[in-house]
Image (cartoon, rainbow, N blue to C red):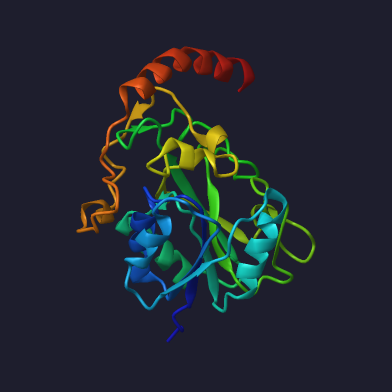
Amino acid sequence: MKKKPVIWVNCLVKNEERWIWYGLNSVLPFIDKVIVWDTGSKDSTVKIIKTIKSKKVDFLSVGEVGKKDFGKLRQKMLEQTNSDWVWILDGDEVWPRESVIKLISAVEKAPLSIQSFCVRPINFVGDIRFIHPETFSGKTPHGPQGLKGFFSTRIFRRNIPGLHVKNEYGKEAFFDKNEVTLRKRKGHVQYLPQVFYWHLSYLPRSSFRVKDREVMMRAQKRKYEIGMKRPYWIKIPEVFFASRPKIVPDPFYKMSLGGYFKAVVQTPFKKIKRKLFT
């Protein structure tokens, strides 16, 4: 019988109080351990993480980290990861149960030649009722010909020769011994179009705007646009309906009136920009 692979999650956070409880709990039942390092949160992120009473959670506050040192911190976390597979989870990612099961099944069945998997991030704008217009029409770099939509490398083998992290925040990536990124390693990466996670990076990740703006590049990531109504088949993560501590924000909040007006004004210009440059 084939041995069940050991899976550890790597998670770096800062001011993630709105989604981190849901993100961690959406994957915890399926993995062996999650390493969570906080890089200087000033909202309720740390308190929320500490409400999760699971021996699988290995939490550490490492303090403020500069943009140029972010890749080094990921490398340090990678070096402390002792597992067959590494799953990258950010504080704004929440997984539906069905997607987790499909991903784990793919990992368990993967031949030795397959060393990483790319899955779909479903990007939301405004609130969780609407998805970003480019979610399924954008082009993923280095993806298979004819495959539309964005994809992200989210899980990979720990024993990839020379596996390491380089570059500053926003550009950091995992490379092999030949300095080739995981996505460019032809023959070793598999795309899973039917596996997706909720990517909430374009929405507020802290309950307070000022706390959001304290995080590197958070202001650039926040988007105002009239999105597409979420398709029925994009299932709501079960963890959104779970009993939660009072300090954990409600995921079903609706965009503010001010945010809606910003979206109305900016949407036409963004549509024109896409037609001109895509």
Q: Quadrant of residue 4?
A: bottom left
261 is higher (above) or lower (below) than 234 = above
User: Does residue 255 lie above or below 144 as drawn?
Assistant: above
Image quarter (top left, top right, bottom left or bottom right) of the N terminus: bottom left
**4 left or right of 81?**
left
Task: Return the residue found at the far bottom.
Answer: 1
Residue 20, horizontal then vertical, whole percent: 39, 55
Q: Residue at x 57, y 75 (%)?
A: 81
Kindly give the residue lying farthest to the right in the view shown: 178
> In x, y percent, where is residue 272?
54, 13
Name above or below for residue 129 compared with residue 155: above
Compare residues 262 and 158 and report the one nearer the observer.
Answer: 262
Q: Position of residue 19 (x, y in %)?
A: 37, 50
In this orientation, does residue 28 appear? yes
Q: Can you give x and y, in whole percent of width and height, for residue 257 in the image?
A: 31, 21
Residue at image location 54% in from the left, 68% down from the top: 86
Pick whichever, 107 or 11, lies toward us: 11
Q: Nearer the viewer, residue 238 or 137?
A: 238
Can you tell which quarter of the image residue 226 is in?
top left
57 is higher (above) or lower (below) than 243: below
Side (left or right) of 21 relative to 171: left
Q: Is residue 5 left or right of residue 239?
A: right
Q: Quadrant of residue 26?
A: bottom left
Closest to the observer: 9 or 150?
A: 9
